[in-house]
Amino acid sequence: ARIADAEIQRGQGGETHQLAGGDVPVLTTQQGIPVADDQNSLRTGPRGPTLLEDFHFREKIFHFDHERIPERVVHARGYGAHGFFEAYESLSDITHADLFQRKGERTPAFVRFSTVAGNKGSADLARDVRGFAVKLYTKEGNWDLVGNNIPVFFIQDAIKFPDLIHAAKQEPDRGFPQAQTAHDNFWDFVSLTPESTHMLLWIMSDRTIPRSLRFMEGFGVHTFRLVNAEGKSTFVKFHWKPKQGMQSVVWNEAVKINGADPDFHRRDLWNAILAGDYPEWELGLQLFDEDFADRFDFDVLDATKIIPEELVPVRRVGRLVLDRVVDNFFAETEQVAFCTQNIVPGIDFSNDPLLQGRNFSYLDTQLKRLGSPNFTHLPINAPKTHVAHFQQDGHMAMRNPGGRANYEPNSWGSKIGGPRESRERGFRSYPAADSGEKRRIRAELFADHYSQARQFYLSQTEVEQTHIKNAFVFELSKVETTAIRARVVSHLLNVDEALARKVADGLGLEAMPQAAPPARELVETQPS
Ligand code: HEM
């Protein structure tokens, strides 16, 4: 709007030239060379061939040719926003993590919500798990809580992740469906993987078609540890509870919204923040010790199980507020790199085999996706605290060690000798005692795949139960192989017989299958 008509010139071929002047800056190349004409490439004569000498043309096309980077192998479609975390109280009795030491302390945060299976250009309201990844730029380094909006997961061991994701994404021969659970490969895999049953109940519930990213919960899923200054460890499950409450759409609405506005969720978040209607979540902790953990009839290292909230209530310890949209989608939302292994002193891992695998996977994939080991130099990934180390060079290095030393120990003094270890402040792993034979084996307590699925189903209202049933019927009706449909029903028989029958009826199964043999005796559970 600032360009007046008088600043427009027409070229010989009638093309538009807008000219710099006043407060309109001069266009330059990446090298800072001022550009005189951005409408015409350099030619020999008006109708002649383009010249190789045209460095402006070549640089512009070269850069455009390299605009795309690989999309995330999962969670490709996402949307992020900035905000802060504010502690309600000091948690120094349970953790020495700096962000939890002082009541009212604010820590800058970046959150990226995502769908899991769809490609970057897929629709927002696909029936899918939502990622809920939070980066907290604490004074002692970045802590990433890379969670989902469902508290459990499909698999117990990270070695199965490539199989799960291959089965969930488009089938390799035909290249579709792009973002649907409704296909043979997905249901084939999960029906052959009974540990998925609990997760299946959750994903067939309304939680996988949220009305807005602002109206959903988040979960860290795994059991982590909090460690206090005396070295005492407490197990913890992390929860994000939306202050807005929880809302979902129904399937009928989801299908229409996807057609009418595939960007429904990202538009909603963007508009809410710009309108000053900042979404807020409370951070909840479920805290328990090793003795308590040993009394559960499931293993707290099993990511297909929740810790029932009536046994371990959720303690709300702070709030997360999203109050700023990004300046640039690519620079921030696309280039942000979350990683479960980014933890800070006072927080530690458990031996959950899914978490242990994730700790390897994220860093590995990000080298490929972002193309350089220096992606922590990008502003969105850079800690907002003192960073000093001897790592150097590599593509796009912007933060090489200063001074003479790029190794230690060294003989150089405080000005040029670089950083040193700190016994007081440095991260120390919790000295958990582990021993055992080296074997590929799962713990026995991982083997009850149905009790908590039943508990979840029975805790739902009648309307919600009907939605779950309808979702099973709809999704499985897209599965062409009838044996796969029957296999899913054989698992549902161990969850709830009435549900299994309704799904079988809805699918028109000719005969009711036998219940799948439970790998471990089921625990009698009542709805809460
Ligand atoms: C990405 C959550 C299991 C590998 C993500 C993202 C989230 C997430 C939220 C998106 C991060 C973003 O917005 O940039 C979870 C949860 C899991 C789980 C809650 C189970 C509890 C796994 C497992 C693996 C894995 C078992 C592999 C062993 C990946 C990879 C990415 C990813 C490779 C892409 C990361 C990137 O390109 O930056 N996950 N995930 N995830 N996840 Fe997971």
Image (tube, rainbow, N blue to C red):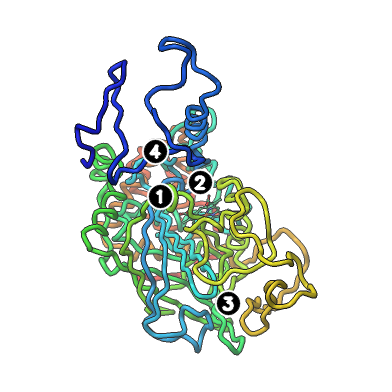
Task: Determine contact: label 4, label 3, CB under 8 Å.
Answer: no
Instruction: Please name the residue that numbered disc 4 is placed on.
Output: 27
Instruction: Please name the residue that numbered disc 3 is placed on.
Output: 345
Tell me the number on the disc at residue 78: 1
Mark 4 or mark 2, which is nearer the start of the sequence?
A: 4
Task: Determine contact: label 2, label 4, CB under 8 Å.
Answer: no
Query: Cα distance, mark 2 to mark 1?
Result: 10 Å
Looking at the rendered structure, the kind of residue marked 3 is Pro
Q: Is mark 2 within 8 Å of ligand 1?
A: yes
Front residue of 219/366: it is 366
Q: Nearer the viewer, mark 1 or mark 4?
A: 4
Q: Secondary structure at mark 3?
A: loop
Front residue of 385/44: it is 44
Q: Residues within 10 Å of mark 1 (few under 14, many from 20)?
A: many
Q: Is mark 1 within 8 Å of ligand 1?
A: yes
Looking at the rendered structure, the kind of residue marked 4 is Leu
Left or right: where does residue 406 sit relative to residue 470? right
Q: Where, by quadrant of the figure, is residue 433 drawn?
A: bottom right
Q: Is mark 4 within 8 Å of ligand 1?
A: no
Left or right: where does residue 484 sit relative to residue 405? left
Query: Cα distance, mark 3 to mark 1?
Result: 29 Å
Q: Secondary structure at mark 1?
A: strand
How far across and down, in percent of the image, does residue 349 sit?
Answer: 59, 71
Q: Nearer the viewer, mark 2 or mark 4?
A: 4
Q: Residues within 10 Å of mark 2 (few under 14, many from 20)?
A: some
Instruction: Please name the residue that numbered disc 2 is placed on.
Output: 72
Looking at the rendered structure, the kind of residue marked 1 is Gly
Q: Residues within 10 Å of mark 4 (few under 14, many from 20)?
A: some
